[in-house]
Image (tube, rainbow, N blue to C red):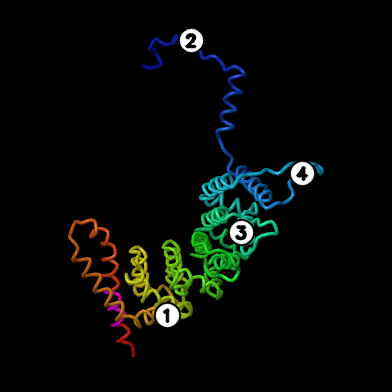
Amino acid sequence: WSLAYSDGTQPSSGDAEPMNKEDVEFLEKVMREGIIDEGERMKAILRDLTDGLEMMLGANVTANDGSGGVESKKKELEEDEMLELLQELRDIVEQIDYARAFMAMGGVPFLLGCATYHATKYDSAGRTVPKSIRKGALGVLSTMSQNNPPVQLNMLEHGHMPQLIQLFLDFTPGNDCGQDGDDAIREKTVQALGASIRGHAMAESIFFQNEQGKVMLQLGLGMQQKALKPSTQLRKRTLFLLRALLTSDDATAERHELFRDLISFVCVHGIDEGWEEDAEIREMAVAMLSHMLHQEPSHSNQSSAREKASKVILQHKNHIGSIGVRRIQAIRELERGSEEREYATLELEEWETLMVALAQASKEVGNEP
């Protein structure tokens, strides 16, 4: 019907006229500029960031342009401009394929260099990579490597683990290198390390063989600096990583034995509101202990890991039980329907689950020959 009739705005019998050359060129330009080639964009970002950092750090201001020795001026960027580029890059590499493509461009050593360059000292002119750029680079590394085995392996091949652990230590208050402490950088470092380790059996194994890695976790939880407790976000990141590693499919009894003191610390301090004032961290700690007691083993190594974890946790069962009974009672006494009661609902569920798991584990241990 619509082909046979017209609304009167145009002659129904008129044929469509072909576009003139100017209109065609205009539409082609719009299409060309409106579609972004992410691969080319990543190359441009890498090139601009490299130039910007070299200018910032006082490198030579000219670069070979690849046309027979002709040199061109390097691009100079402000710190805010570089941060915008890092954020754009992070948005792009959220897609796994683009993350692998940026890795193939040499993105991993570049980002590691941004994060760790002169971490412990300044050059003769007092220049170094700004903290904001370090954090931006660490954020991109986190996004690239999370659940992405090829990128995780590539980071291992570039020796990222000792570099990032040292970065964490360099920005720990009271360090030996004279660097000011910075919990924001330490938090971003734990995040990047966690994303590059979790779910990768080889990376997890290497991390647990690194003594400094254990020190990093201890410092992140606040075990060695009780007078100066780490920031809430850093404690949260560290506990999240610890839980992921101890409840991993590749966790072993040896791993739990090696980290016995960290498990004990969580049992004593992580669940206690007298030490840990953040409710979310307490919930995470209770959930971690419950998971370790409840975890169903899928192979013999995991079975022995669960037994080891149960024995470590049961050493603190009286302390855990007393805190649990007190918290459950306190939450149940809150007015039903109140905002405070709703906020504490998850904590109540976690505590009830842990108390059941604790009783079951005690029974199983009691039945052992």
Q: Amino acid at mark 2?
A: Gly
Which element type, helix, strand or loop, lies under badge 1?
Answer: helix
Residue 276, x across and y down, in percent:
36, 69
Give the amino acid at mark 4: Gly
- Splitting the image into 4 quarters, where does residue 269 fall? bottom left
Alpha carbon distance from label 1 to label 4: 60 Å
How far is the residue under mark 2 from the one under mark 4?
56 Å
Amino acid tagged 1: Ser
Between disc 3 and disc 1, whose residue precedes?
3
Residue 45, quarter of picture: top right
The nearer-to-camera label among 2 and 4 is: 4
Local packing at callout 2 (Cα closer than 10 Å; few below 14, some 14-19, many 20+) is few
In the rendered structure, the answer to whether residue 177 lies left or right of residue 284 reads right
Q: Is residue 248 visible?
A: no
Which residue is identified by label 4? 66
Q: Main secondary structure of the magenta part?
A: helix
User: Which contiguous range is marked in magenta?
Assistant: 355-363
The quarter of the rendered structure image containing the C terminus is bottom left
Mark 3 or mark 2: whose residue is earlier in sequence: 2
The residue positioned 51% from the left and 50% from the top of the image is 94
Say which quadrant the N terminus sits in. Answer: top left
Q: Nearer the viewer, residue 129 or 110?
A: 129
User: Mark number for residue 14?
Assistant: 2
Density class for disc 1 (Cα within 10 Å; few <14, some 14-19, many ≥20) is some
Q: Which residue is mark 3?
A: 112
Give the residue at x 34% y 70%. 286
The image position of residue 14, as x and y in percent, is 48, 10
Which of marks 2 and 1 precedes in the sequence?
Answer: 2
Mark-to-mark CA distance, 3 and 2: 64 Å
Q: Earlier in the sequence, mark 2 or mark 4?
A: 2
